Structures are given as C-alpha cells and as structure tokens.
Image: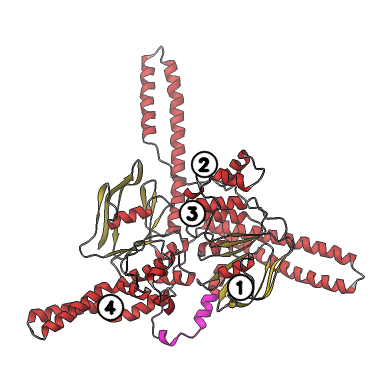
C-alpha cells in the first residue's frame, strides 16, 4: 500500500535549485535512507513533504487519515510540562479515544440503543488494537531503551538542552507510532547503546520510515533502500548504504568508460572531417560528406554520456606527528576524577603506548569527556597519578569547534595564528585542506560543520602532536567530511585516543578499546569487531533479567556488507601498520642488544635490559603472527576476486 507519493516536485530559492522534477513512492513498511552532502537540500525536502514549505511545482500525496511525524519539528509545550508529559503526548490519539469511550459509557447509562452499543464496541476494539491498554509498558520500553532515568523524565522539558529536547521528541514520536516517520539525524545525540536500541526499534517498525543520517553503520543496519540527493536530482536504489555506494562506484566507472569511448569517436570523426574539408575544396561531394560528419559530431556531443561526479581528489593534508615520543606515551594509575570533590570515576588505571589508536567508549554522562578534561589539564585529578612519557606533545580536537575570531576569513585566520607565515604559504596550506581559490576569503562564521572540521585540522597541522585527543570528531559531519577526517587520521603516525559513538569510524580507526562504565575504565586489547563479539558472548552467557525472561528472542542484527575492494584496502592498511610496528620493535631490540654488550659487567642493569628484551621479543612474535594471519587473509581475498 502506498503511504507517500511524490510527483514531479520542484523547489528553488532564487537562482538556486534545491529539487528539480523529482518523483518517488514509499510503500508501507519501507525503511529508506536519504543521503547527500550537508546543504544539498535534504531537510528542505522533508519540509516540502510535511507542507511546512510550499513547492514551486509538483505534488505530495498522502492517503486520507495517514499520520506523519517529523523529528526536527519540536512542538511547543506549556512551561511546566515535564519530559514524561511531553513523551506521553505521543499517546494523544489513544487519549482522545479514552475521552470518547468515557463519554459513550455515560450516554449508554441513559440510552442502550443498538447504534450506540455498536459505536462503543467498534471504538473499543480499535483502542485495544492500537495498544491502548499497553501505554505504560510501551512508555517504559522506550524510556529504558533510550537510557532515560527517572530524574531525566521528571525534569522540565523547557530546561533541556537542544540535544536533550531532540532525544525526548524522538521518544514521543516512537510512542505515537505514526504511519509515516521522517527522521532527521536521529542518532546525533544518542550514545551507542541507545543507537543500537533505536536500530532494533526501526528494524521492526511496521510503518514507513524515511530518515536522513550520516551514520553509515546505522544506515546499513536499518535501511533497505537508499535515495541520494545531489545537484537537485534524486538517485533511487534498492539496497542499503554500502550496497548503494558499491553500485554507484561501479556505475561511475562504467559511465566513464562510455564517455571516453564517445570522446575517442568524436576526435576520430573530427580528424576525418578536417581532412575531408581540405580535400573538398575541389570536390563538392567531399564537402557534403564533411558537413554530414560535422552534424554527426554535433549529435554525439549533444547526447554524450553524463559522467557521475565522484571526487577522487587525493588528500594532501597531514598532521605533524611531533617527533618520536617514548614508547610509553601516557600512564594513569589509580585515578579518581570528578567535580566539587565528588568522584565521577574511580580506580582508573591504564597505559598508552606509542602508535596505539584507542577508542574511549561509554554511555552519555559516564565520564568520558571528564577524563579528557583531566588529561588536558582543565580538571585536576582528585587522587592518583598521571604521567606523560618522554617528548609527548598533546592536542585536543573538541566536540564543539570554536574559533577566537569567527568574523575573520580563512586566510586571515591562518595569518594571525602563525607568525611569519606568508599569504602564499597560507593559501598553499589551505589548498591542501581542500580550500581552493575564492574559498579562502569566506568568513569562518559562514563555514559548514565539515568545513570547520577541515579548518581546525589545518590549524592543528602547524603544531607538533604525537598524542592526539579527539572528542566526537565525526559528530554533525556529512559522510564525505567523515571520510576526509578518516583519511587524514590514517596518515597520522602518532598516538590517538578518541571518544566516539560512530561505529564505522571506531571500526576503521581503533586497535584497542577502553570502556567507561560503572564509574571506572575497563580495557579490551583488540579492534571494535572483536570487542563487539566479546560483548555479545558475555551477554549470551549472562542470565536474563526476571522481567525479560518471557520476551521473544530479538531477530539478529544485519551486519553491513563491505565490498571486497574495501576489505582489501582495510587489510593492506592493517598489514602496513603491523610492518611499521615490527620495524620499530626490531630497532628497539637492536639498540637493546648494543646496550647489553656495553653493560655486560653490570649484572643489575643487565637483568633489567634482559627483561625488556624478553618483553620486546614477545611482542615481536605476536606481531609476526598477526602479520602472517593478515597476509594469508589478503591472499585469499585477492584469489577470490
């Protein structure tokens, strides 16, 4: 059954075309991802679908009686409304039925006519079918799934931050169960546990879902259809995000080959035509043949294949690694940290070694950013010891990007921040971060989220950094900007410690996981996939809660499909990182061997050096095993291709 039909929709602002003659149909039960760069018009399209904006042409058709909700539209509520009261407005249709049923019961005390009884029975059956008697159960399920505490539920809605209001509105919409659900960045203010719960909720949702998201893992696990808005046109594909990107890349290559063949043919015909015109000075027949060929060339040019625009610009931006730090970059021992003397985290102990890429995971409010504040000196530790290694140079990329003078242009921002920098050198550095031509004269205040991230990386590129702290580095960025950040960080040789809820980013970047939970930090030696497998195994062996013992088993989550080419590139990156670590440890072992020769008569020192040598050799053996395993995996993948 069609739930939403869009026909020949057009919208422009002045000379800027937002959507141009787009048409699509959504049927009940579909879960569709709407993707595209920030500023391409996705949110405008949502406003056209809801009627908040009027289209210049075309129409949007919704069946009579169908209910539509959109996440970015937060209704106004009385100032005294609590979060729970706001959420329960999602039950408004049921509450209206309750009032009508109560009125009918009152009427039936005086009038027991068949028509009145029939009306009551029909309405009561509908009320029951829509879950009227399960409101409290549904409320508790959604509140628990989105990690809403009783304290949060009782807070005034008007006192919430923008992100908290969005989260409460998402919960309200889930409770409302509309026929058509429009979600604009639903995961932006959720922690990982809430994101995964939302995935399950939407996966089993029986209405129609159209969602805007830059969370690639979320798109892969929830959606079965992808629509991309680009240059005011809509591309529609039956498949999730990864499947669509594979298709798009293959299509781009096919169109490129076709275009090249057409250009080759045009060039060949032009050469022949030129010769015929030269010969045709004496021969009218040859002149006519040349003119006919020129018409054929014109037709080829008019109907030539349109190439798919895929940016293949090589990322030239780099971050200075700050020089080689000591092998031990950071040591935390029995740390307690918090506010006003009250610890939020206790007994935190872990060590970071040079070259590690560590993800710091945990629910919102668990203490991740508090730990970062302690590491940057903004917040003192209440107890314990923090020790930075030799030659460690630290920098932080905060979650909220701010600039001292947003009224300045990009060029002036660099010139004022770096003494002695010439205008040409500044423009060259900005160009390496994809700010080209007149873009360097844009005001910082006018930049998009992705552009601000690039500018902040550009400013940091002047600083020597070998311990880079990142707090939600991909938040609010579109997919292209996220991939840009990932490419820069993959080239970075220093140590990374980052907070993120972006599972795609974590999977690509992390080789170790720290988890903040229950007021302390636990350590997992391995990548994100291994961490998730271990977490799933623990959950499977744990006894079920008494309240959940009778619940049906949830359907398994669908893992995102990764193309063989992407798998191959990922393996090559891991092998390269492994080889780099092997070279570093072999260099250390060689230096140790020389030192042991020099200290051969000092038994106390020799014993310490021998212990370090044994530890280094053990790590080297592990790395060689990992290198061999990765190499065999890559070989098998290449042989299948």
Nearer-the-camera pick, 264 or 417:
417
Q: Name the residue nearer the viewer: 267 or 159.
A: 159
Q: Nearer the viewer, residue 556 or 98?
A: 98
SS type, badge 2: helix
Crowd class of label 2 (few under 14; some 14 to 19; many from 20; radius 10 Å)? some
Q: Which residue is mark 3?
A: 449
The label shown at residue 207 is: none
Q: Earlier in the sequence, mark 3 or mark 1?
A: 3
Tag 1 residue: 524
Quadrant for the N terminus, please.
Answer: bottom left
Measure how far apart labels 1 and 2 are at the Cα level: 46 Å
Foreground: 245 or 450?
A: 450
Is residue 546 found inside the magenta-colored segment of the image? yes
Q: Residue at x 55, y 64 (%)?
A: 506
- In this rendering, the answer to whether 592 lies above or below 405 is below
Residue 238 visible, this angle: yes
Q: What residue span does the magenta drawing correspond to?
A: 534-560
Callout 1 crowding tier (Cα within 10 Å): few <14, some 14–19, many ≥20: some
- Marks 3 and 1 sit apart, C-alpha to C-alpha, by 32 Å
* Outermost top residue: 282
Residue holding disc 4: 131
Q: Nearer the viewer, mark 2 or mark 3?
A: 2
Residue corresponding to mark 2: 441
Quarter of the image for residue 554 reads bottom left
Q: How far is disc 4 from disc 2 in space, using C-alphas?
A: 57 Å
């Amino acid at each position: 059954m069609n739930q939403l039909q869009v026909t020949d929709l057009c919208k422009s602002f002045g000379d800027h075309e937002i959507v141009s003659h787009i048409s699509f149909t959504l049927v009940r039960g579909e879960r569709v991802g709407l993707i595209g760069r920030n500023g391409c018009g996705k949110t405008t399209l949502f406003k056209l679908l809801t009627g908040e904006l009027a289209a210049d042409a075309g129409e949007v058709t919704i069946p009579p009686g169908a209910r539509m909700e959109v996440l970015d539209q937060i209704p106004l509520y009385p100032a005294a409304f609590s979060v729970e009261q706001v959420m329960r407005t999602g039950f408004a249709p049921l509450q209206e039925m309750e009032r009508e049923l109560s009125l009918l019961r009152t009427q039936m005390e005086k009038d027991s006519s068949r028509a009145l009884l029939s009306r009551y029975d029909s309405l009561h059956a509908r009320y029951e079918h829509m879950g009227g008697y399960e409101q409290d159960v549904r409320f508790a399920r959604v509140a628990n799934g989105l990690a809403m505490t009783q304290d949060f539920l009782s807070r005034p809605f008007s006192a919430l931050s923008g992100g908290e209001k969005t989260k409460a509105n998402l919960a309200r919409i889930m409770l409302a169960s509309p026929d058509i659900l429009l979600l604009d960045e639903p995961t932006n203010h959720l922690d990982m546990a809430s994101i995964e719960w939302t995935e399950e909720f939407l996966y089993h949702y029986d209405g129609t879902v159209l969602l805007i998201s830059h969370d690639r893992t979320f798109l892969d696990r929830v959606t079965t259809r992808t629509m991309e808005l680009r240059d005011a046109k809509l591309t529609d594909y039956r498949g999730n995000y990864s499947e669509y990107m594979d298709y798009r890349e293959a299509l781009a290559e096919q169109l490129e080959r076709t275009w090249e063949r057409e250009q080759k043919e045009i060039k060949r015909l032009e050469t022949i035509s030129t010769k015929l015109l030269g010969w045709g000075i004496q021969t009218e027949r040859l002149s006519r043949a040349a003119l006919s060929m020129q018409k054929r060339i014109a037709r080829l040019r008019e109907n030539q294949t349109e190439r798919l625009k895929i940016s293949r610009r090589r990322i030239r931006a780099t971050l200075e690694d700050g020089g080689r730090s000591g092998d031990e970059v950071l040591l935390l021992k029995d740390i307690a940290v918090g506010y006003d003397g009250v610890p939020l985290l206790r007994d935190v102990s872990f060590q970071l070694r040079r070259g590690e890429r560590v993800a710091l995971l945990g629910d919102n409010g668990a203490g991740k950013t508090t730990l970062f504040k302690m590491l940057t000196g903004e917040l003192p530790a209440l107890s314990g010891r923090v020790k930075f290694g030799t030659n460690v140079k630290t920098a932080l990329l905060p979650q909220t990007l701010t600039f001292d003078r947003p009224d300045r242009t990009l060029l002036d921002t660099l010139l004022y921040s770096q003494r002695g920098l010439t205008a040409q050198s500044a423009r060259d550095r900005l160009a390496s971060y994809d700010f080209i031509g007149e873009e360097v004269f844009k005001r910082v205040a006018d930049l998009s989220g992705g552009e601000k991230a690039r500018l902040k990386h550009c400013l940091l590129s002047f600083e020597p950094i070998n311990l880079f702290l990142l707090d939600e580095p991909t938040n609010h960025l579109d997919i292209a900007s996220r991939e840009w950040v990932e490419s820069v960080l993959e080239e970075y040789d220093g140590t990374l410690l980052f907070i993120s809820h972006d599972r795609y980013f974590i999977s690509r970047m992390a080789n170790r996981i720290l988890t903040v939970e229950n007021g302390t930090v636990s350590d997992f030696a391995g990548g994100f996939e291994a961490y998730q497998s271990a977490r799933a195994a623990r959950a499977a062996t744990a006894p079920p809660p008494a309240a959940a013992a009778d619940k049906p088993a949830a359907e398994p989550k669908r893992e995102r499909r990764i193309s063989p080419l992407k798998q191959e590139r990922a393996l090559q990156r891991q092998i390269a990182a492994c080889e780099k670590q092997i070279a570093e440890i072999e260099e250390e072992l060689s230096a140790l061997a020389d030192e042991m020769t020099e200290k051969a008569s000092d038994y106390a020192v020799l014993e310490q050096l021998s212990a370090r040598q044994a530890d280094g050799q053990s790590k080297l053996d592990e790395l060689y095993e990992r290198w061999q395993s990765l190499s065999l995996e890559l070989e098998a993948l290449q042989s299948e291709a």
